[in-house]
Amino acid sequence: MLYEAQHLSELDTYITDMQDPELLRWWGKYNESLGHFDTALQSYQQANDPVALVRLHCQQEDFVAACDVVEQSDNAAAAFMLARQLEATEQVAEAVHYFGKAGRNNHGVRLAKQHGMDDELLDLALKAGLHTPTLLAAAAILHSSALLMLDTAEYFEQRRELDKAVLLYQKAGKERRALELCFSANLVETLASIASSLTAKSDPAVMARCADFFLERGEQERGVQLLIQACQPSRALDLCLQHNITITESMAESLTPGKEAAAKEREALLKRIAKLAKQQGSFQLACKKYTQAGEKVKALKCLIRSGNTDKIIFFAGVSRNAEIYTLAANYLQTLDWHSRPDLAQNIVTFYTKAKAWDSLAMFHEACAQIEIDELRDYQKALQALQEGLKHVAKSQKAGKQTLVDSFTRRIAATSAFLQAQQLFDSDAASAVQICNGLIVELSSDAAAENSLMEAGVCIGDVYALLIEYWASQGGMQQAHALLERMRLTNVPSEPYIEAAIVDAVYKAAQEALT
C-alpha cells in the first residue's frame, strides 16, 4: 500500500522497524535497481544476507569489503561467489583461497593447476572432503574428495614432485601406490612417515615390504618395528638378536601373541622374548615374559639378577612352589639379613614353606655364628643352634646324622662355655677346668678337621675368659702362660682381650724375671 502510494520514506521506516529479512532483501533489491547502493547494502546487512552483500561489493569492485564480509560471516556460498568474481578479474591467488574456504576444492584445484600454484594445490587437495554439508551427502563427497586427491597425486607424479604425490596417494587410501613410489625413488623419510601411520589393520604384506626396504638400507630398528606390526614376531626377534636391538617394554607387548593364539606357539614365543630380554639385561621384563609362559622358576632367577628385593619377596610369596621358595631364601641370605629382621623372617618363612629343613638348619647355624663373631652373645647362639637341630631332625636327606652330630657337638661346646662363664662367680675351679678342657678339645686334630666345631665356640673367647679371671685374681704367671700359648698357636689376643690386661700381664712377668 505504501509502495503503491509512493510513500517511500514511510515505507523505509516501516521495513526498518519490522526487521523482516524477506522485506529487507526486497527493499535492498529495489534500492539497488535504482542505483541507491548504500541503502541497498544497509538493507542486505540488516537482512544478514552475506551473498547479496558480496555480490554488490564485487559489482562495485570493492573486493576488500567483499572479503571482509566473507571472513566475518564464514558463509560458504558467499565465499564461492567471491571466488568466482576474483577468478573473473584474474585475482588468481585470492580466488584459489576463497574456493578453498567455500569448500569448492575442485574449482580451486583446477585454477591452481592452470597457474602452477603447487603449494596451494597440495593444500586444497588435502583439505578435500573436510566440508561435509549433510550426512546424506557425506558418502558422495568422500568419494569425490578421493578422486580429487588421486587426480592431484597423478599431477604431482607427472611433475616428479614425488613427496607430494606420495602424501596424496596415502590420504586417498592408495597405500600400495604411495609405497611403490617410495621404493622406486628411495624416499626413506617419506616411507618412514607412512610406515609410522600403519596399523594392525593395514595389509601385512605391505608392512613386510616396508620392513624389507628399511632392512636393505641398514635401518634395522625401523625394520623390526614394521615386522612387529606385520605380525612377524619370530623374524623380528631374529633381527633383534642378530643386530643387538634392545627390546623395550612396548615392543615386548607388541610381540606377545594374544591369548587366542595356539598355546604352544604362544608359550614358545614368550620364552624367546624372555630369553632375549635376559641376554640384554632387562631382567624384570624377562621375568614378566617367563611368568606369562608359565616358567616361574626361570622368572624368579631373572628377578634375582635384577636385585629388586621387594619384588623377589612378593613373587616368591605368591608362587606356592618349593623350588621358588628355596631360591628366594638363598638370595635373601646374600643380603645384610642380620641387620634386617624382616629379611631374616622371610628366609625362615620361605625355607619352612619349602620344607628345606637342611637349609633352614644351616641358616640358624649362620645366625649362631654371627651372634658369636660380632656380638659375643653365646646365649643367643645356643638358642639358634638348638633351633637348627630341631630342623635337622626333620630332614629326610642322606647324611642327616652327620649334621645332627655336628649340631649336637656344637651345642655341647656352647653350653659348656656358658656354664663356665656362670661358674666363675661360685666355683672358679670347675670353671677353669671346663675352659681348659674346651681349649684342648678345640685345639685337637679332630676339631681342626671339623670347621663346625670351631664355629661352636671361638677358642679366643675361652682364652680370654681364663686370662681375665687369672689377672683379676693376681695369677699373672698363669695368665702369662696362657698368653704365650695363644701366641704359639697363632691365636691373636687383640680381638678378645683388652690391651690393658695384656700389658699388665706382660709387665708382671717381666718384673718376676728381674
Image: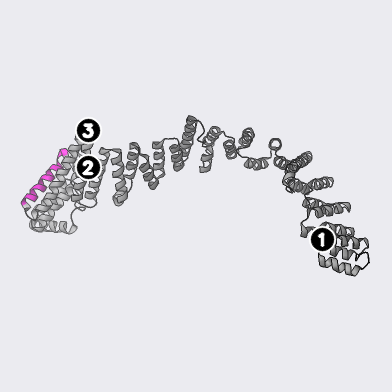
User: Residue 119 location, x and y as percent?
Assistant: 77, 48
Depth check, mark 2 against mark 1: the one in front is 1
Note whether 9 is above or below 154 in the view shown.
Answer: below
Residue 335 horizontal side relative to residue 461, left or right: right
Q: Nearer the viewer, residue 213 or 266?
A: 266
Whole-number angstrom distance, CA of label 3 to CA of label 1? 109 Å
Residue 64 can be seen in this image? no
The residue that label 3 is drawn on is 399
Identity, as a three-letter code, of the amino acid under mark 2 = Gly
Residue 436 covered by magenta stretch: yes
The residue that label 2 is drawn on is 388
Chief SS of the magenta region: helix
| Range drawn in magenta | 429-446
Regarding mark 3 in the picture, which secondary structure is present there? loop
User: Residue 229 location, x and y as percent?
Assistant: 59, 37
User: For residue 154, what is the image quadrant?
Assistant: top right
